[in-house]
Image: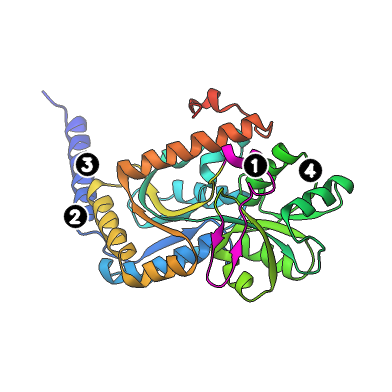
Amino acid sequence: MVGKKSLGLMIMLAVLVYAVAAGAAGFPERNLQGIIMWGAGGGTDGVSRAITPNVEPILGKEIVMVNKPGGTGAIATQFVHSSASDGYTLLFGAENPQLYGVLELSKLSYNDFYPVNILARGQVVIIANNDTPWKSLKELVADAQKRPGKIKMGSTGPGGVPYVVGMLMKTVTGFDVAPVPFDGDGPGITALLGGHVDFIPVNLGAASEHIRAGRVRPLAVVDSKELVGNGYTVPPITQDFPEFGKYVPWGPFFGVWCKNDVPDEAKKVLVEAFKKGAATDRFKDFVASKEAVLMNISGDEADKYLKKWQSVTTWLLQDAGATKVSPADLGIPRP
């Protein structure tokens, strides 16, 4: 016979399960919050704010966007992971969490989240201040080798695009530069324009307008193929250094995630809304204007992409001696 105390506990549990299910069935009933892991003006911020207006009419609710930079995105990632598992707090991020484990930045990764949509992937360009003397990546590397530690490279901290590309360049060329960290591509490019740093590897989406306007000098694209942009071309990094061939193409990606344990019905609503939003001509035009590649994938397909990217990049950093923990210790297979 079930005691009164046990019966009361069972009733409370049943009510809680019903409430969660009912809430998910009517999702969303209120506005959502979107947490952007990087600062305003950068590639992640741009993609996040471009997709949102296309999704809000489908959801019938507003997504209130908040920039929460710091810790190479780890602060925003932890914030969303600590939020309620109801689907109302979304993480708008880039590739960085896939490197947290090997860099000991956080115990979290995208394995702890559900990929609502990987929206687009970008290319990386190495751009220099116009007052620098270099006309090619080869000239930059040669100068850095003559003046070790004197040339300032804009960065975004361990795990960011500039950091990874900087380590890749160091591995291949042996150059030694002084990294100066910023809270995203936007602040880093602003510093470059002001002459506070000499060069920076950044997502093309954040730099393309500056390249077209002639405000910065592109030295190379991190790819084996020439980049043909809107009114400009950029040579591949392999042109001067064929040794980069085994690492490229390499670049960032951008998307939106929720917690793994968000109810399935809420996940389904979010996936459908972002899939439709990313398929709009308005968002497609935005992606094309940034010379990025539209992806619009979710679920298992997105998960496979994330795992492959993590495998390639963490082992690249491991082989460069830039990790604090071996990918093998985290169960990440070598590609």
Badge 4 is on which residue? 175
Residue underneath mark 1: 242
Q: Secondary structure at mark 4?
A: loop
Q: Amino acid at mark 4?
A: Phe
Q: Earlier in the sequence, mark 2 or mark 1?
A: 2
Q: CA distance from mark 4 to mark 2?
A: 56 Å
Along the line of sight, the residue nearer the viewer: 236 or 195: 236
Q: Earlier in the sequence, mark 4 or mark 1?
A: 4
Picture coordinates of residue 258, whole percent (x, y): 38, 50
Query: Is 94 included in the stretch rendered in magenta?
Result: no
Q: Secondary structure at mark 3?
A: helix
Q: Identity of the amino acid at label 3?
A: Met
Q: Verify CB contact (< 8 Å) between mark 2 and mark 3.
A: no
Q: Which residue is mark 3?
A: 12
Question: Which amino acid type corresponds to the residue marked 1 in the rendered image?
Answer: Pro
Q: Residue at x 18, y 47 (%)?
A: 18
